[in-house]
Image: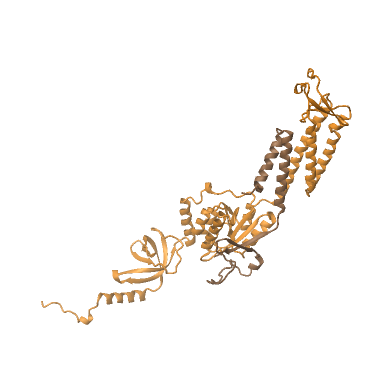
Amino acid sequence: MAGATLPDPACILSISALTRQVREVLEGRFPALWVGGEISNVSRATSGHLYLTLKDSSAVLSAVLYRGVGFRLRFEPKTGMQVIVRGRLSVYDQQGKYQFCIEEIHPKGIGALELALQQLREKLERKGYFDPRRKKRLPAYPRTIALVTSPSGAAVRDVLETLGRRWPVATVVVVPVRVQGDGAASEIATAIGVLNRLHAAGQLCMDAMIVGRGGGSLEDLWAFNEEPVADAIFASRIPVISAVGHETDVTISDLVADHRALTPSRAATDLTPERDVMLATLVDFNCRLREQVLRRLDQSRQRIIDIADRRVFRSPLDRVHDLERRLDELDERLGRAADAPLERARQRVVALAGRLESLSPLNVLTRGYSLTRTPDGHVVQDVATVRPGDLLHTRLARGEVVSRVEDVRPTQEMP
Amino acid sequence: MTDTPSFETALADIEKILRALEDGTTTLEEGLAQYERGVGLLKLCYAQLQDAEKRISVLAGLDGAGKPVLQPFDHAASDARSAEAPRRPNRPGTKDSSRLY
């Protein structure tokens, strides 16, 4: 044979030309469309592009999600996952293949947000972020409280109102951040980091911080489900209360935080004692302290009575004087206190001081007793402490006798 | 650390003093000294609780040296622009003085 009849060279297509035509047909015939299937293979290139193979029971489709498509991937696509993708077919010239260019990808059956939440939760759980053993104790009486939230939402108002009512003694620093939308998570995370840095540097010390916002949809609350916020809370040395207003869903920040409050105002309640309760506690302490000291004074009064009834003084007079002086001091100090319970107690102490005065050993001296001391002030109770020749000062009801010891004669102790 | 004990420490100390006094094991001298200390701590606690002037500020930013810049916080004034309002137009580059970043 002379050979097959070859077509006119003008009719022979180059590979590029054919491919271009295939591309035109494919891309023209299959513009934007939705496709559902299972991910059978997935890899993320260093370029940031995500390559997937989608399949069903009898066919496979190569797909790619280019970085910079503008779609925010909320979850991590994994092998075996059922997904729905939106995109268009395209031809990859160099490989002679067609592929599906993904513009959106959604998990099937479960919302992307729920899936992302589930995935992040599992990841952080493995990293020990939710471990109750690493949760910090909240301060019992916080003096300084930081509030990381929107400066204009209901949350900031609720927290400030609650703090003002319960615990107005705290200094509050509002750290304004956006609490929803792109960039909110990084603002919240940065704010937590800045607070910790200022705290560590001693420039703005905080006893605790409340991080949160009012209620909203899962989408609205999303910033509190993002990893940067979780990382910042986990790293915080300042105890963190997460307060994202919602009843049913738990956010990641709730799980990582040292304490979770259902609403911002509940966070304020959980964080602080009530000032009025604390004032009542102080009044109670005050009364108990006074009861104790009055009991003591009563006991000493009884001792003075006992001593006065005996032939020999057993207690040094200077102790009684000392007691009297201290009562005077207490009296004066209590006089300066304005509170009613303090005033009442002061009056009790004054009355007691009066009673003590009536029992003063000076009164006993008028009954003929005297008090003998050594020159250095020690009350002589036992002849063993003096020797012939020692100087003695004897206090009488009126005046003092200075004498020198001639002789000492021990007697038997009277029972 | 300052010389003034914190509210929490002061309360704990008062409780300790009360326990000691109520045990009745202290001498009169010690008891009186403890009492006086207790009264001093109580006054300190009272003073802290009485100091209830509202101090609310906003961390407006950091100065050149990285030190905090605090301004008085006025919630009513900031109500005008609601950061929590849905679909708030995104205005990159908009000057916002109360924003930290």
Please provide percent x and percent y for residue A36. Answer: 40, 65
Query: Where residue A103 sits: x, y (%)?
Result: 42, 69
Chain B: drawing colour? brown
Q: On the rendered image, what quadrant is the C terminus of chain A found in?
A: top right
Compared across the picture, whether A2 is left or right of B73 comes to left
Q: Nearer the viewer, residue A56 or B20?
A: B20
User: Where is B9 relative to A209, above or below?
Assistant: above
For the N terminus of chain A, the quadrant is bottom left
Quarter of the figure with residue B9: top right
Answer yes or no: is residue A246 visible: no
Please tell me which residue lies in front, B37 or A67.
B37
Q: Which residue, as the protein is rendered here, is positioned at the far left?
A: A1
Position of B21 relative to A229 (above/below):
above
Residue A93 in picture, x, y percent from top left: 30, 72
Number of marks present in the image shown: 0
Q: Nearer the viewer, residue A23 or A303?
A: A303
Query: Is A8 on the left or on the right of A357, as rendered?
Result: left
What is chain A's hue in the picture?
orange
Whether residue A342 is visible: yes
Name the colouring of the figure.
Answer: by chain
Q: Quadrant of residue A409?
A: top right
**Displayed quadrant of residue A106:** bottom left
x, y percentage for residue A22? 30, 75
Answer above or below: position of A102 versus A381: below
